[in-house]
Image: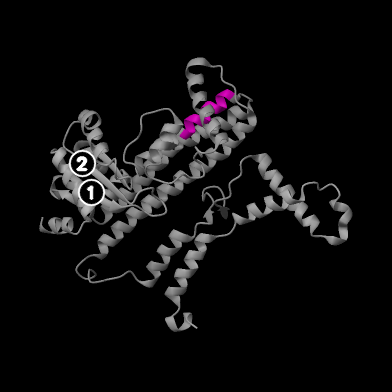
Amino acid sequence: MDSLKQKKKQLDPRIQGLLSNLIKVIPSVVQVYLNKGHEKKNTFKFRWNIIIDAPKSDISNKFLPIAQGLFHDHQDDFHNVFSLVYAKAQLANGNLYFNNHCRIEHLIYGDCHIGFPWNHNEGPTNEKFLTNMEADFQKSLKGCLAFQKGFTYFMSDNNLSQAAFMAHQGFELGYRVLEGFLCGKVKICHKIEAHQKFLERSIHQTRGMFDLEDNTEKELLELLDRAYSSARYENSFHMKRDQLGILEQKLECFLDEIRQLFDEELELLKTIVTNGKKTSPETQNREEPNLLDTIRQLSEDNFAMMRPANRWTKKGYYLNHIYMHSHFSLFFTLRSTLNVCILALDEHCDMTLDIENVKEDVKTVLEFSKNLVPLEEGIYLDEMRKLMLSDKETTT
């Protein structure tokens, strides 16, 4: 209890004030957990998990609006409000969100003895728990993959409206899977846009999600939501094949990203468990991570230009951050690349006669090439230089 009081005193005054106001206006708060968000992955600086000993209906109708009012002027803070019964059940069932972010070391208010047995599991129990988590995730993902297969089937059968419905279901179920382990709860809604906005409170937009600032993607998202309502109530929806082609690519990318995000969260939990074992009396005097651990963390944060291909289907890597508006845009870029190469061949001037928009071709190729510059890896190399070379070697 003394250590908890000491921890509260060390908190930023803004956080202390917000915590005091929270406890004052919601007396039934029993625990508050606080941890920092990941700078590159999350859209917030601090994550608050507020546990209230009250029925679930009261959480939604009574306490959640109060919490939203308190956090209205604190846009860098992500907050979730859960009932104690729900939080315990999710933790016991292996929800990654609660296992990663509702731990004793994150507790800033409340009694650590009222709740969460996961913190006391040891040895083989942990290993079995992690295995069960992964098995449950794979089971959930199978539903998404089934809708993806249905999409492919109806596309081949030229039933485009039904294919669009399958795409919608694949996205919706995928968002529900993501929300479970990234937000701690699932949004009950069929609109993909609503799911995306709900998830964007927690993580930055991924390549498989929709760019709501882009009119074309916004229109595509609206068509996807209409495909669901039409299939359920009207059965009079029409969608173009090229639009479905874009959805096919986005859905495949989205499902791949779900796997990647789950692996990252599971790895975070494994790291927590491993570090917990290292804090035994024999090893608790270790002050800093060793050089290899530091290099691994730097690599994880900054090797962002390429990502491994789905290990279940192929080996190799995909390039990240290369956005293409459509198949036509891709083919136009490829043609421009060939035109620029032809223009570089001075001795073959006759080949350039049908190249009409030289400036546009050069501009297209340069814009595409700019996206290939690995800025994140530049950060990595700067930090690695500091780690691997002495001051004498790095100064002139």
Render colour scheme: one colour
Q: Are marks 2 and 1 in contact (CB under 8 Å)?
A: yes
Magenta stretch?
Answer: 161-171
- Give the image quarter of residue 220: top right
Q: Residues within 10 Å of mark 2 (few under 14, many from 20)?
A: many
Question: Residue at left 59%, top 36%?
Answer: 246
Question: Which residue is nearer to you in this view: 372 or 172?
Answer: 372
Between 127 and 231, the one lying in front of the other is 231
Residue with the mark numbered 2:
51
Q: Is residue 25 left or right of residue 196?
A: left
Alpha carbon separation for disc pair 2 and 1: 8 Å
Which SS does the magenta portion mostly show?
Answer: helix
User: x, y percentage for residue 198?
Assistant: 38, 37
Q: Position of residue 172 (x, y in %)?
A: 44, 32
Relative to 188, say whether 107 is above or below.
Answer: below
Q: Secondary structure at mark 2?
A: strand
Q: Between residue 233 and residue 99, name the one nearer to us.
A: 233
| Residue lying at 47% horizontally and 65% vertically, measured from the top left | 380
